[in-house]
Image: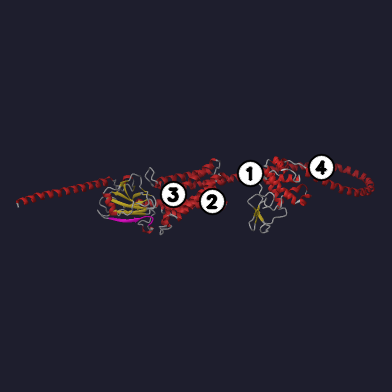
Amino acid sequence: MPVVYALRVRKIPYRLLSMFKLLLRSLISVTALALCSIINVCAQTTVPINDKVQQHIFEYKQIYWLEDTTGKLNFNQVKNLARSGNFKINQEPTPVTRHPNSAYWYRLSIGKNTGTKNNWLLEFFDQTIDSIAVYSPVTQNSYSIAYLGSRHPFAARFYQHKNLSININPNANNDGVYYVRIRSNHSVNVIIVLRSVSRFISYALDEYFFFGVFYGMILVFGLYNLMMFIAMRQVQYLYYIAYNISIGLYEMCADGIAYQYMWPNLPGWNQYAYGIALFAASIFAVLFTQSLLNLKVNAPRLNKVISWVVILRSLYFAACISINNNLFNYKIIEFIPLSLAFYAGCYTLFTGYKPARFFVIGYAFLLVGFIIKTCIALNIWWLPVSEFDYYSLSFCFIMEMLFISFAIGDKVRILKNEKDDAQGHMIMQMRQNEELKDTLNKRLEGQVRERTRELVEKSSMIAEQNEELKSVNELLQQQAEEISRMNVLLEKDNIILHNDIEKVTHDRVMSAEVDFEEFSKIYPDRETCFKFLSDLKWEHGYACRKCGNTHYGGGHLPYSRRCSKCGYEESVIAYTILQNTRIPINKAFYIIFLMYSTKGKISSHKLSEILSIRQSTCWAYSSRIKKVMESRKKEIRDAGTKGWSKLVIDYTAN
């Protein structure tokens, strides 16, 4: 018994010692974990509440963040992760959510709300955030939750304001730690602002005032261009009006104004309405660029490139609508039409097109604003985001519209000056013509007076001669009978002589060798040949070959005629021997003339030598002419000098 008791006594202290060691280790681990958590929490910068500073934007170490890649962590789990030191220090001016499938948690530390006379709130600048959950401390271990975001009905907001705002707890008796959960289907800038309510009201009033000015200016630019369209009837003004409306709608979507006033009960539509507005602005901008800069004439190749960009951008828009609405988030694609329009302005300006100068300045502003917004979106902006940075694109839109209006006015002014110069030249020419007319009239009047004086002087001589003529008349009467008899004989001789002269003239013309240079003086170019064909072809009136209608209008090709009833257009060379030939038309005329003059005896080698055309081409074309000559022997037999033209009209080849 004593031995056993001794062993038991020795065992009890050993077990107690083991338990004490285990307890000591656990205490050390808990203490170390607590110290790490305290150190981590203390490392975060606390933003104090101070009535002297009515507004503060959270940045850098003032924000800690955690990415929940599953999107399923609850608030208690997040708090445990925060105690474990899993939150990361924000190293950027403003945090950015980069993965649409992740939920992002942000932790803010705000000082005690004591000694202040104002109420305070948290405000989120980016109105396009889909969902925000704000966990505000109430007591030491309890939190209240508020939901915000563009996916929630607008009426559910505590403040009926375009920005997402929530009051902070005014009864917190210590430094408050706020947790914010943000999830969005696109990348957003997490710009969180601590404001006093009085500053918020003042800021909101100023902001809405400037919004009124901004959208009012867009409306004024639109009405101005509408008046210009009514006066000028040019489609470029309609493009610019549509562009202004699209820009206004896009800015309203980006600012949250559209969600507040236009579709507050349609949060689903609010998710991609900005993409439709941005697409319309992009398309109408490049169409307006094409029209204002007259790229079809000033830069044809660049005009084709812009047309292809419009088509590809439209296909991308169709993919955004029908396949995946999240494709609207890639706003960087708008840099392509924007930079192309800017390049088109620079190119036409360097080529001497003066209206492009204000266009280039306006688009330079727009390009700068787009770059600033892109840098902010990609979080490569080196400064903390302020109101000026956030609304820089709106300011650049206004400057762009202002300078584009200058460009439109400049173009109208240049056109007016050109018109005035043309009218000035016409007036000067009319004055010169009037002076020439007066000079000629004075000269003719002098000549008439001189001629009248001469006639008066000669009238006396005529009177004397009349007496002599009376005596001569008697002699003439005697000779008249003889002359009458001779006239009968001469008339018979004249008929015979006339027939002989016509035959000799015909033979001389048909045997005449007129070179191409002399022939080209009569038919020097394509315009002259087309006019000759038009007069010859419709010499007896026009009748549509499809419906027989006799009324027509001008067609697309020179001297072609379009039926006013069925719209059938007939070119001037259709249904002629010139149809489907690749020989220049004046040379084709000359080949017909030579074939007619030589009665088809001239060789294709000779034609090739004269006209510098391949022999095979001359042979093929001369063969066609020979067939027509053979089929129209009777028509061209006595046709005279214009007989070759009868080989052209009414040719039935298609």
Q: Residues within 10 Å of mark 4 (few under 14, many from 20)?
A: few
Residue 424 numbered mark, or none: 1
Comparing labels 3 and 1, the label whose residue is closer to the camera: 3
Q: What secondary structure characterizes most of the magenta part?
A: strand
Q: Position of residue 129 (x, y in %)?
A: 38, 53
Disc 3 target residue: 331
Q: Residues within 10 Å of mark 3 (few under 14, many from 20)?
A: few
Q: Is residue 651 left or right of residue 216?
A: right
Comparing labels 2 and 3, the label whose residue is closer to the camera: 3
Q: Earlier in the sequence, mark 3 or mark 1?
A: 3
Q: Is residue 298 visible?
A: yes
Per the model, the C-alpha gap separating discs 1 and 2 is 29 Å
Secondary element at tag 4: helix
Q: Give the amino acid type for the residue marked by disc 3 in the picture.
A: Lys
Q: Is residue 527 left or right of residue 154?
A: right
Comparing labels 4 and 2, the label whose residue is closer to the camera: 2
Q: Earlier in the sequence, mark 4 or mark 1?
A: 1
Per the model, the C-alpha gap separating discs 4 and 3 is 89 Å
Comparing 9 with 85, the one in front is: 9
Is residue 351 placed above or below 179 in the rendered structure?
above
Residue 161 figure quarter: bottom left
Disc 2 target residue: 237
Magenta stretch contains residue 146: yes
Q: Earlier in the sequence, mark 4 or mark 3?
A: 3
Comparing 503 with 97, the one in front is: 503
Residue 451 numbered mark, or none: 4
Per the model, the C-alpha gap separating discs 4 and 1 is 40 Å
Per the model, the C-alpha gap separating discs 4 and 2 is 66 Å
